[in-house]
Image (cartoon, helix red, strand yellow):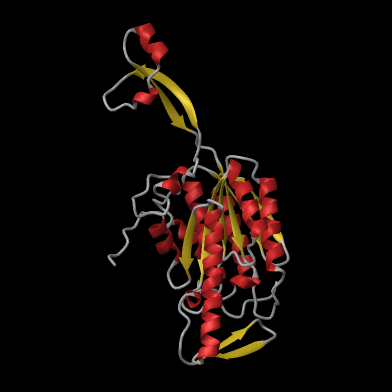
Amino acid sequence: MPAPAQQPDGHVYVSLAQLMALAFDARGLSFLARQPRASVLAGSHASRLRGRGLNFDELRRYQPGDDLRHLDCRASLRTGTPVVRTFTEERDRPVLVVLDQRMSMFFGSQVSFKSALAAQLAALCAWIALAAGDRVGALLFDDTRIEYLAPLRSRSRVQAICARAAQFNQALSADVPDGDAAHGLDTVLQRCLALAAHDCLICFISDFAGAGERTLHQLRQLRTHNDVIALQVYDPLALDLPRQGRLLVTQGQLQVELAVERRQVHKPLSEFLSGRLHDVAQMLRRSQVPLLMFSTAQPAAEQLRMELGKLRRPPA
């Protein structure tokens, strides 16, 4: 594994210690708790998350405020008094955190690189799952490899996920050319289909570079028997390209300097970047997968708290 160009600072590269420390930021967060109206998981989105199943607990006398849909007619007639069924929520559900660390993620124009932000989101998702009593596993991938950690309900499993996320992240380098992004993304989704048979919660964290119609088909297949949440990581440069100066773009071996102040450069480049982001978001929405979007310009925990409706959005 090539050594990182600098010490992990949480912006370009992340460390195991930094990801483990996110356990504090994940406290009080839940993917399935009742969400305020401002949350993306409220309304129609919330209905798409199955959550855990319900186990029958007991029959008891009706109490004011009980849901009448749980009224047991036969038991009520037999006893001569209203009787309701009570249920307990299943506490065991596998959660699979899918983390993208391809070269397309090794980019950032403001606070963080997409790859670093994604690794932090993966750690937060793992900590949330563990706090909810769920088993948590991970599927990590870059341009050349895929690694699977089976779901377990233990802090040591979360630590292993954070350790592998940090290792994948620190292996990224501008000297390494990117691979076939479209092939990588669809290959990972195919692996997800084989691993997640049913009743899993899958948190897919990626910029979704290279997504296409096959990706859409696989996402629809995956959500047939599972809950899937897409966490799309993007850089603000895609939405607001600077109009002055020059932009230096490199993939390690090649460098291109773009004069963005020139209209014939700025307009097509801006349309291409924003259009690709819009196309991917539209594709994810067509798959009916709840979509959460995360900018590299803000901290991961703060954005996740806002997206889950746990933090009031500032007034416009």
What is the quadrant of the C terminus in the image?
Answer: bottom left
Q: Residue at x 49, y 44 (%)?
A: 49
Is 59 displayed left or right of 273 in the figure?
A: left
- Compared with 19, 5 (above or below) is below
In the figure, 288 relative to 102: above or below?
Answer: above
Foreground: 123 or 56? 56
Which quadrant, please, contains the N terminus?
Answer: bottom right
Residue at x 45% of width, y 64% of height: 300
Q: Residue 67 is drawn in which quadrant?
A: top left
In-image side of 59 versus 268 (left or right): left
Q: Is residue 121 visible?
A: yes
Q: Is residue 286 left or right of residue 22?
A: right
Q: Is residue 17 visible?
A: no
Based on the displayed image, in which of its 4 quarters is residue 178 positioned?
A: bottom right
Give how far across and how far down residue 254 sits, in percent: 68, 86
Between 149 and 310, the residue placed more toward the observer is 310
State the image quarter where residue 188 is shown: bottom right
* Total marks in image: 0
In percent of width and height, residue 279 lies at: 55, 65
> Does 263 sit left or right of 173 as displayed?
left
Task: Pick the residue in front: 141 or 276.
Answer: 276
Q: Position of residue 51 (x, y in %)?
A: 49, 41
